[in-house]
């Protein structure tokens, strides 16, 4: 078992798994073992069950066995169709998340629970979208902007508004390829239509549509999610936090916030600070309420409030195994249904809150946005009352935790960059210092390291190995999602981590006062990365694809990650996947993804499961791009 762990938290995770055996609890590892070898057809993407003539599966050996499904679909079509449906699901997830936030902004009011916290960002967006702002109440502006955003999901004409933020050269690429997404839901619906039996039967066309759908995520749903969350809950600024299971506190009511949407978690944060709730916690014998985030909800609340991070995707079961968690409060996405049987072995309450993600066996307490704080208090109360039921003999909290700085929104990064601007020479508040150090070669490039955990890879191992290699080679790292949480746990978002960086990056970190790995937020916040890359490209009068940058998903697992990878490549940024996607059953799809797409978007996919080899490939690609630019 130890082979599956990264050394920095090997001991505690091994101890927790031993505890699982003693407590008679089944974990992800038991289920993985029970799966035995994965189905080779599914692994290669060559099985299809989209109509009742099937399921069909194509022989992996050319010329031997079934070469087509009953309808005549080839392996190329089946693989591309399956991938397209992953993109659709990923785009739907990010976008539905964003739709809810836009709805919340539509109901925001001065005396309500949801308020406008970043007026400047709202006013900037209003002027970008042509909404009148003079002599108007800020909430009136907010409601009109929210309505425009809600129309982005299903407008009958035109293309998505945020695409205009991209460099001109990129927009031309999208126009030439005809992949500018129109309305978000429309792209999802169209791709589901096209992947129905007897519709698109051409792999290249399917991958082309996948990029358009994915762009509706990155430059639509995810961007709305990020921008609107900042307006409603505040644009993040750098702040200290701690991460790993050691943030759980034996003396306090421990509440794990897990899932994705910030509307719930923001209210839980407010509710837990409420004097009435604090008093109740004391009454049940606790010293207070200890919130700890997990996955992207964890990222949202740590970015804006410094709430500690219990862990990433892989650790959701581990947190319950500590026996010290009063409640796991979840909304949507990346929530293991196994939390039901696991929490049943302890006193922990597993509370679902969204009608979109009910789980049999969990306690469902619906979160109502129209009475958000009251709803959140009811949920927090349930957790506090449960403190009395904690069984001391079942508690084991590992001690490991690390501290780090989080909160690097684009605005926060630009503010840090201002530290090295001479205002007599250059304007403040621009991305120029970053472009300058890249041009000069002080920084060789920049990479976004994002994505999940996957039991096919040692926990966090690939994330950390790749991050270390990047910074040692003067490549600055921006990170989001569960990768970002891995970085905090490993101490890489700590400013002291600059000692692991090469001389160029270390100097930049010192002058600008940043760590070498910047935590940019949750998975929807990858839209922040798209924005920074676009701003640097605009500043240098280049396209994104010219820049020495790359996206890396070392331990990805979800369909959302597939959508992300597709919009990153469509945005002109090479994408390195540390887990092989289910596409190897089609030579054509592999050829398009890892080769031909470059002629279309200027970027392509690299698939490499060895993190060290992957890191070398990233570095050589960055140097290749620098050479082409003559920098
Ligand atoms: S769509 Fe074609 S390949 Fe897929 S299950 Fe139906 S018959 Fe088989
Ligand atoms: S990085 Fe992956 S596992 Fe983590 S929250 Fe995002 S989609 Fe889920």
Image: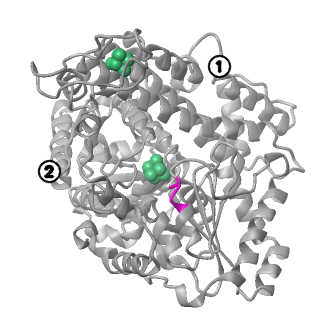
Q: Which residue is the site of mark 1?
A: 154
Q: Which residues are magenta?
A: 335-339
Mark 2 secondary-structure assignment: helix
| Quarter in which the C terminus is drawn | top left
Q: Which residue is the site of mark 2?
A: 613
Circle 1 packing at 10 Å, graded few (<14), some (14-19), many (20+), is some
- Above or below — where is 534 with respect to 608? above
Q: Are marks 1 and 2 in contact (CB under 8 Å)?
A: no
N-term-proximal mark, 1 vs 2: 1
**Spot occupied by residue 377 in the image (x, y as percentages of width and height):** 80, 64
Residue 421 in view in this figure: no
Circle 2 packing at 10 Å, graded few (<14), some (14-19), many (20+), is few
Residue extending furthest toward the right: 111
Q: Nearer the viewer, residue 529 or 540?
A: 529
Badge number at residue 465 = none
- Lateral position of residue 257 relative to residue 268, left or right: left
**Spot occupied by residue 47 in the image (x, y as percentages of width and height):** 30, 28
- Lateral position of residue 324 relative to residue 604, left or right: right
| Quarter in which the N terminus is drawn | bottom left
Magenta: predominant secondary structure element?
loop
């Amino acid at each position: 078992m130890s082979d599956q762990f990264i050394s920095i938290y090997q001991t505690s995770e091994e101890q927790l798994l031993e505890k699982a055996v003693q407590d008679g609890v089944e974990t992800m590892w038991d289920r993985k073992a029970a799966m035995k070898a994965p189905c080779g057809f599914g692994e290669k993407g060559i099985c299809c069950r989209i109509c009742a003539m099937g399921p069909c599966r194509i022989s992996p050996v050319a010329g031997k066995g079934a070469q087509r499904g009953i309808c005549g679909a080839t392996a190329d079509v089946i693989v591309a169709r399956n991938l397209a449906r992953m993109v659709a699901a990923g785009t739907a997830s990010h976008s539905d998340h964003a739709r809810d936030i836009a709805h919340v902004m539509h109901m925001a009011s001065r005396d309500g629970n949801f308020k406008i916290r970043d007026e400047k960002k709202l006013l900037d967006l209003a002027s970008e979208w042509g909404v009148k702002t003079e002599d108007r109440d800020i909430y009136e502006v907010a409601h009109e902007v929210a309505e425009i955003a809600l129309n982005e999901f299903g407008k009958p004409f035109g293309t998505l508004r945020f695409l205009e933020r991209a460099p001109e050269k990129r927009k031309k690429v999208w126009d030439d390829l005809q992949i500018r997404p129109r309305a978000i839901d429309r792209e999802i619906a169209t791709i589901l239509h096209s992947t129905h039996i007897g519709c698109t039967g051409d792999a290249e066309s399917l991958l082309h549509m996948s990029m358009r759908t994915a762009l509706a995520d990155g430059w639509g749903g995810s961007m709305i999610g990020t921008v609107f969350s900042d307006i409603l809950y505040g644009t993040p600024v750098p702040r200290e936090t701690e991460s790993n299971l050691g943030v759980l506190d034996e003396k306090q009511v421990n509440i794990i916030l897990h899932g994705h949407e910030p509307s719930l978690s923001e209210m839980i944060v407010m509710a837990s600070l409420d004097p009435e709730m604090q008093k109740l916690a004391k009454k049940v014998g606790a010293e207070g309420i200890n919130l700890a985030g997990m996955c992207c909800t964890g990222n949202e609340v740590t970015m804006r409030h410094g709430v500690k991070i219990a862990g990433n995707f892989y650790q959701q079961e581990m947190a319950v195994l500590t026996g010290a968690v009063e409640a796991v409060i979840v909304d949507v996405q990346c929530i293991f249904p196994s939390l039901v049987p696991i929490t049943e072995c302890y006193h922990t309450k597993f509370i679902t809150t969204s009608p979109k993600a009910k789980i049999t066996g969990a306690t469902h307490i619906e979160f109502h946005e129209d009475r958000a704080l009251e709803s959140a208090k009811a949920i927090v109360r349930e957790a506090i009352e449960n403190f009395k039921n904690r069984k001391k003999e079942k508690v084991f909290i590992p001690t490991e935790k690390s501290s780090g700085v989080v909160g690097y929104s684009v605005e926060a990064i630009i503010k840090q960059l201002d530290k090295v601007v001479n205002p007599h020479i250059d304007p403040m508040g621009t991305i120029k210092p970053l472009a300058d150090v890249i041009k000069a070669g002080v920084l060789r490039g920049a990479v976004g390291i994002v994505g999940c955990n996957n039991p096919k890879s040692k926990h966090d191992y690939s994330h950390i190995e790749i991050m270390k290699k990047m910074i040692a080679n003067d490549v600055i790292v921006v990170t989001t999602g569960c990768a970002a949480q891995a970085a905090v746990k490993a101490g890489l978002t700590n400013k002291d981590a600059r000692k692991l960086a090469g001389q160029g990056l270390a100097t930049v970190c010192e002058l600008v006062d940043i760590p070498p790995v910047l935590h940019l937020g949750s998975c929807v916040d990858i839209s922040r990365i798209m924005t920074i890359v676009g701003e640097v490209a605009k500043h240098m009068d280049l396209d994104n694809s010219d820049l020495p940058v790359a996206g890396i998903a070392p331990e990805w697992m979800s369909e959302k990650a597939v959508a992300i990878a597709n919009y990153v490549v469509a945005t002109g940024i090479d994408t390195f996947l540390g887990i092989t996607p289910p596409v190897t059953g089609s030579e054509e799809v592999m050829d398009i993804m890892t080769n031909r797409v470059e002629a279309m978007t200027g970027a392509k996919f690299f698939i490499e499961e060895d993190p060290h080899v992957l890191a070398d490939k990233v570095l050589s690609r960055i140097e290749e791009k620098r050479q082409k630019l003559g920098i």
